[in-house]
Amino acid sequence: MINAPIIMIGPMSAGKSTVGGLLAEKLGWPQYSLDEKRWDYYKEIGYDKAVAAKIGQSEGMAGVLRYWKPFEAHAVIRMLAEHTDGVIDFGAGHSVYEDETLFRRVQAALAPYQYVILLLPSPNLDESVAILNQRFSEVLAQEGIKPDPGTLSANEHFVKHPSNSLLAKITIYTNDKTPEETCAEILQHIADDGGE
C-alpha cells in the first residue's frame, strides 16, 4: 500500500501540478494544490496584501519573496495538517527557505512523509534553469504576458537553492519525458520501494 500523501515540490514550470494530477488520477486519490489554498493560510497569521504591494514597488520581486517566507512555511504546515491523503503539489517557493528557522520548521513538517518528490528537468542545474524559464516564458506568451526578469531570476534561485534537494526524498528528472512517462516513473519508483 502506498503511504499518502505524495508531495510534489520543485521550481516553477517543473510539472508539479500536471504530474500530481496524473498521479492522483491513477491512484484514485484527491489532488490538493497549495497555491490554491495559500492565501487563506497566509491570512491566518496576518498576511497583508497592501504591505506586499508596497514591498514589491520598493524592492521588486526579491523583496516580495522575502516577505512571503514566514507565510509560506505556515501554509506548508497547515496544508499537511489539513490533508493526510491524496497528492499535494506545493508552489515553487514553498520548499525554498533562506532562513534556517523557517527551513527547519518545514523540514520537520515533511519528515514523516515517505514520498516528497522533487521534479527537475535535469541534474545539470543550469540546464534545468534554461528549460524551466523557456517553458514558463512560453506559458506567459500564450497569455500575452511578457516574462518578468525578476520572476525568471527567482525561478533560477528556486532551482539552485539547496532547500529542495534537502527536503526531497526522491528526485525525478523529467527532460524529454511526457508527464505520463514521469508519472509512470514515479509509480515504478514507489513500487520498487515497496509500495504497490
Image (tube, grey):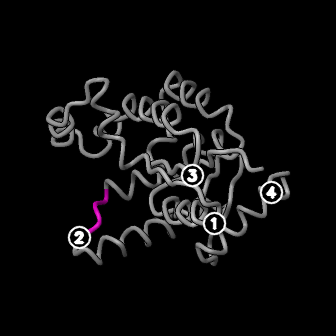
Which stretch did the figure color magenta?
145-149
Which is more toward the observer, 109 or 81?
81
Task: Identify the mark nearer the N-term, 4 or 1.
Answer: 1
How far from the left and from the top, in percent, is residue 151? 34, 55
Q: Which mark is residue 26?
A: 1
Identify which residue is drawn at 65% across, 45% down: 4
Q: Is residue 148 magenta?
A: yes
Query: Judging from the image, what secondary structure is the residue with disc 1 in?
Result: helix
- Name the residue tied to disc 3: 87
Looking at the rendering, which quadrant does residue 48 occupy? top left
How far from the left and from the top, in percent, is residue 22? 57, 67
Disc number lying in front (2 or 4): 4
Cα separation, mark 1 vs mark 3, equals 11 Å
Q: Is residue 142 above or below residue 47?
A: below
Disc 3 to disc 4: CB gap under 8 Å: no
Q: Is residue 76 magenta?
A: no
Identify which residue is drawn at 25% across, 30% down: 47
Q: Would residue 10 appear left or right of 50 to someone viewing this image?
A: right
Disc number lying in front (3 or 2): 3
Mark 4 residue type: Glu
Q: Which mark is residue 145?
A: 2
Which is more toward the observer, 88 or 137?
88
Q: Count residues near mark 3 (Cα–Cα under 10 Å), then give few for <14, some for 14-19, many for 20+.
A: many
Identify which residue is drawn at 51% across, 21% down: 101
Query: Judging from the image, what secondary structure is the residue with disc 4 in?
Result: loop
Q: Count residues near mark 1 (Cα–Cα under 10 Å), then give few for <14, some for 14-19, many for 20+.
A: few
Q: Which mark is residue 5?
A: none
